[in-house]
Image (spheres, rainbow, N blue to C red):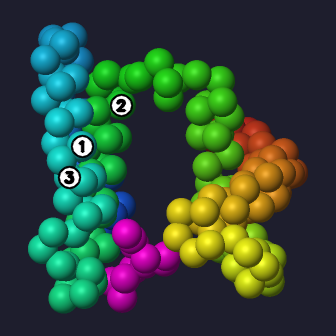
Amino acid sequence: MPTAGCSRAGCRPPFSWGLVAYRSFKSADVRRRRVRGRVLLALPFGILLLIAFFDPLGLHARASGFYFAFWGLPFGALCLWQALYPSKFLRARPAQWLADRSFSIYLLHPVVIVGLRPAYDYARTHGVPDGAWLYLACLAMTLPILLLAAQITYRLVELPGIAAGRRIAT
């Protein structure tokens, strides 16, 4: 699984894959999209995600920087796939709500996780078994607080910032 944070090179590798996906989208002829194109993009995403997740080459232990950079590749493919063939799931209202607040979620998640470490330790020492159950328990503690904090910063910081940017742009 990926490690939290960025490699020594910063976040350039994963963001670079996003730029490749963007450039690919901009150069694609969106008028000639075919159904098989959906599969041609979904298949590499799935394969690359499985390779990144299961790490059959042992890159995490042998070349962690390369491993971290590789994680951007499936998500770059996902970005291109969804730009060309948006899924109903990602266009649904809950997904859009999360997408609108994604920057706040991205910025706040480390703070919330560090703040909840005592609660995670309590769960681990008081009967929640390690592994998937502990992960789910920690996720259940984290998500409500994170999403509430993201909603607050979205309303108080992001929306006013977006409005100010629009005023400046005009």
Q: Nearer the viewer, residue 130 or 56?
A: 130
Write the start and end of the magenta stretch as one range. 1-11
Does residue 66 appear left or right of residue 139 in this picture? left
The residue tagged 3 is 48
Q: Above or below — where is 27 with respect to 12?
A: above
Residue at image x 17%, y 36%? 43
What is the quadrant of residue 86 in the picture? Answer: top left
Q: Earlier in the sequence, mark 2 or mark 3?
A: 3
Do labels 2 and 1 touch, CB within 8 Å?
A: no
Q: Amino acid at mark 3?
A: Leu
Residue at image x 13%, y 17%? 36
| Res. 168 in view | no
What is the quadrant of residue 114 in the picture? Answer: bottom right
Residue 91 picture location, percent across and down: 53, 23
Does residue 132 appear left or right of residue 79 in this picture? right
Q: Which mark is residue 143?
A: none
Q: Above or below — where is 1 with respect to 168?
A: below
Residue at image x 49%, y 76%? 4
Residue 151 picture location, percent across and down: 81, 47
The residue tagged 2 is 82
Do labels 3 and 1 touch, CB within 8 Å?
A: yes
Does residue 9 appear left or right of residue 145 in this picture? left
Residue at image x 77%, y 61%? 141
Q: Secondary structure at mark 3?
A: helix
Q: Secondary structure at mark 1?
A: helix
Q: Nearer the viewer, mark 2 or mark 1?
A: 1
Q: Secondary structure at mark 2?
A: helix
